[in-house]
Image (cartoon, grey):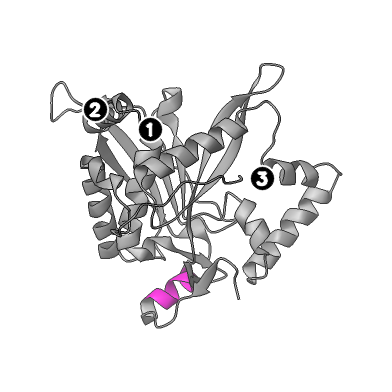
Amino acid sequence: MRADGTRVRGLSPIVQALPYIMPRRYDAQNWANDYADENILRDYIRQKRREGQAVTHMSVLAAAYYKAALENPKLNYFVVNRKVYCRNHFCFSFVILKTRAGGTPDETVIKIFLRPADTVFTISQRVRDAIRRNLVATHNNRTDRFANMAFSIPGLARLVFGLAYHLDQHGLLPRRIIDLSPFHTSVFITNLASINTSYIYHHCYEFGTTSVFLCMGKPVPDPLAPGKRRMPLGVVMDERIATGIEYSRFFAAFGRYLRDPARLERRLDGGGEAVQEEKMTV
């Protein structure tokens, strides 16, 4: 019945039981940390920029994650109301900093939808376009406008978000609301390296369908390789969507693509022609 996913059938008894044993997402959170080779990422980004391609850490990370998820589709599962679903699309959410008209710092959240025919270049372009549209002082994306509407009348926000949560629990939340909600996402990524801050383990939100939260921290010296640096990654995962071996296979693939980002320049699904970028609204 859900607009964003299909109920997964044929699960083993223990996997079916987990959402009843751990009914809340914060019950089922596992924490892990990993590292990306900052020298490889930095050299690759610089090389692409010399070639006229504006690639960033965010776009490389998102492309590597998506490619690994295409090979390990359970990473795009989610749990709502004790039921396991397979998401019928892939997207990632992230926060950007901007400045209000008065000069005070502010934040807004962006959600980007990806397609199997994407490459690291089309993802980079889509991220840049979304950031450019949302860096203006006013809150101008659909998520911000919806939140402003909800808080415009005293008491309305509690009603709106309470109703949205209830509808979501029963698979009745309209696709239009799901599309603008940054909490209904395949993975939430935060880049604390951009504000020179160490990584954290960020919780997965109970509202929505976020099953994985990935945090990039500021690069640090690699104690095993003098002269090199590595970027720490803090990962929080909903253990109900995949087994330990499935998570292991996913992160092994994720790491391979971060160590060889040139493999992300072709269609991420391994097909022929890459997708042609087009105007998209956020």
Three-letter code for the amino acid on which mark 1 is drawn: Thr
The reply to whether residue 216 is visible in this rendering is no
Q: Mark 3 or mark 1, which is nearer the start of the sequence?
A: 1
**Image coordinates for residue 232, horizontal then vertical, percent:** 31, 35
**Image coordinates for residue 7, horizontal then vertical, percent:** 50, 76
Q: Is the magenta stretch mostly helix, strand or loop?
A: helix
Residue 27 highlighted magenta (yes or no) = no
Residue 134 is tagged as none
Residue 43 is tagged as 2
Q: Mark 3 points at which residue?
A: 143
Name the residue nearer the viewer: 121 or 151. Answer: 121
Left or right, 141 with respect to 55, comes to right
Q: Quadrant of the C terminus?
A: top right
Residue extent of the magenta highlight: 15-21
Three-letter code for the amino acid on which mark 2 is drawn: Asp
Q: In which quarter of the image is residue 108?
A: top right
**Image coordinates for residue 40, horizontal then vertical, percent:** 22, 32
Q: Mark 3 or mark 2, which is nearer the start of the sequence?
A: 2
Q: Name the residue under label 1.
A: 56
The reply to whether residue 71 is visible in this rendering is yes
Q: What element carries label 3?
A: helix
